[in-house]
Amino acid sequence: MRKTLTELKWRLTGILGKAVIDLIFSTSEIESEGYARAEKYMRNRNVIAPIWHSRILIFGYLYRGWNVASMVSKSHDGEIIARILRQQGFVPVRGSSSRGGARALAELIRLVKKGYSAVLIPDGPRGPRYKVQPGIMSLAKKTGAPVIPVTYSAKKLYFFPSWDRFMLPRPLNRCRVIYGEPFFVPENADRQTEEILRLRLENELCRITEKADRYFGHKTP
């Protein structure tokens, strides 16, 4: 009985979470910038999209209906995210840099090679904030999929006092999604090349996040 009630609680968490996200973004005007340079890759729906931990909320809404896999930690917070992602039609792959990461990365590689896109949180699950972990380079190198940095901001929002300063937009809002410069990680990339590309991704995600916030007059926390 207890197991059944726990499962019911988690299922309701996913349903309610999706409903709140749908309410926020279905009542908001969503603009985009930089999509033209990413369109030829996005059209194939087989990309790697890194997004900062604090900016993940909109993307389950934008890409619902796609074949998308996302690495989600095995923590309590990760279970909440996983349940919402399932309701949005995503495939959550459980694992993180601190727990089950190697197995989760192997599963993501398999799914991306199969034709899925991957949404990754390069500074999750515990930070440090705005620092890209190296796993995404391995995924891109072993699959050949393009890496497209993505972020967003909103006119009316609230930043939580959490480690990632998670951003919650209000309903009836204006949001701006920005796509960064796409790039590939060569199959024969050595560690030095991977590190150069890792830093490039980190800098590009920071740049477009600051640009998105600045568009609405906010300062990136």
Image (cartoon, grey):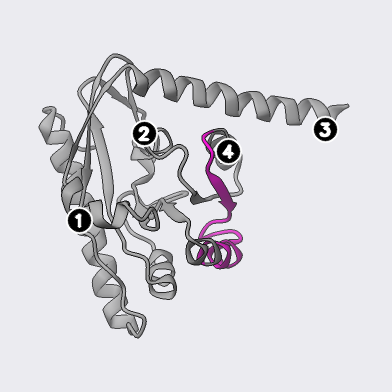
Which amino acid type corresponds to the residue marked 4 in the rendered image? Arg
Name which of mark 3 and mark 1 comes first in the sequence: 3
Residue bearing the label numbered 4: 86
**From mark 3 to mark 1, how far is it between C-alphas?**
44 Å
Which amino acid type corresponds to the residue marked 1 in the rendered image? Glu
C-beta proximity under 8 Å, tags 2 and 1: no
Residue bearing the label numbered 2: 58
Query: Where does residue 212 sit, x and y in percent of width and height?
Result: 17, 37
Side of 62 relative to 217 (left or right): right
Which amino acid type corresponds to the residue marked 2 in the rendered image? Ile
- Front tag of 3 and 4: 4
Residue bearing the label numbered 1: 204
**From mark 4 to mark 2, how far is it between C-alphas?**
15 Å
With respect to residue 74, does 195 lie above or below?
Answer: below
Q: Secondary structure at mark 3?
A: helix
Name which of mark 4 and mark 2 comes first in the sequence: 2
Quarter containing the N terminus? top right
Q: Which residues are magenta?
A: 88-109
Name which of mark 3 and mark 2 comes first in the sequence: 3
Say which quarter of the image contains residue 219: top left
Residue at image location 32% in from the left, 56% down from the top: 131
Question: Which of the numbered marks, if any, corresponds to residue 3?
Answer: 3
**From mark 2 to mark 1, how far is it between C-alphas?**
19 Å
